[in-house]
Amino acid sequence: MSRISVIIPTFQHAQTLSQSLDSLFAQSRLPDEVIVVDDGSTDDTLSVLTPYRERITYVYQENQGAPSARNHGFDLSTGDLVIFWDADVIGKPEMLEHLECSLNEHPDASWSYASFYWGRKRFHGKPFDVQALRKQNYIHTTALIRASAFIGFDPRLKRFQDWDLWLSMAEQGKKGVFVDEVLFQVLVESDRSAYSSWMPKLAYRLPWNLIGWMPDVIRRYEALREVIVEKHTL
């Protein structure tokens, strides 16, 4: 039987962390280890984690960003399957079980992934297709990955880390398998300093170059997207 390591990177996620952990410990297929990497939080993360300390491995690091926190957690993990379960993810009880079953049924796949909700908006996954992935990411970071296939997150990227990972793995001939279910929800937080933040899709489609002004968040988005485009020759 496989051993599943759950890695939870967290930065300023005190308001969602307990809900995320509760959903994790309510899984029909319980994880074999849970590693929480605190990336320099200054909120109430430690007090929130107190009731869970006997069931988790807690690690603190100075703030370096989500990719570094995830890589740190992976280096400490012992499972042959790993999942980067973000601190604002609420999983359905059957989530780990169904993702693991899919990998067992597809030994040629390196990771399994599913559809999800971001707040109230449903994000539909699709069967794995490299050309579709090169056009747009449709796979969330919270996917179940074979540890032997994982190549690490690029610590330089402050956004699109998941897209970069899947593209990099696909370029090595690795592939994912889609579980056609909605298996989790990402909570949308009010704290903009936390890892996950959201803006309406319309905001990214506006002709800012014609308007003559661009919000900083959009400017950063476009600059980081260009990094992915150049890195993977999209």
Image (cartoon, helix red, strand yellow):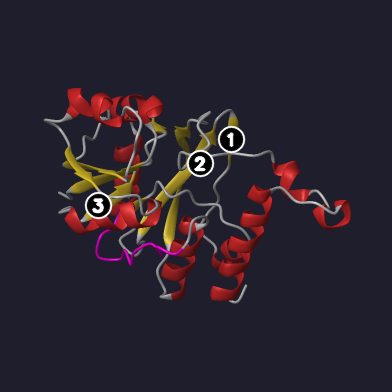
Q: Dot 3: what SS?
A: helix
What residue did someone put label 3 on?
73
**Residue 16, horizontal then vertical, whole percent:** 39, 27
Q: Amino acid at mark 3?
A: Gly
What residue did someone put label 2 on?
115
What's the magenta region?
Answer: 145-156
| Sooner in the amino-acid sequence: mark 1 or mark 2 | 2
One can see residue 101 in this view: no
Q: Amino acid at mark 2?
A: Ser
**Residue 99, horizontal then vertical, whole percent:** 35, 45
Q: Dot 2: what SS?
A: strand
Q: Amino acid at mark 1?
A: Arg
The residue lying toward the viewer, choosing from 193 and 55, is 193
Which-is-in-front pick, marks 3 and 1? 3
Badge 2, how many Cα within 10 Å: few under 14, some, many 20+?
A: many
Residue 193 colored in magenta in the image: no
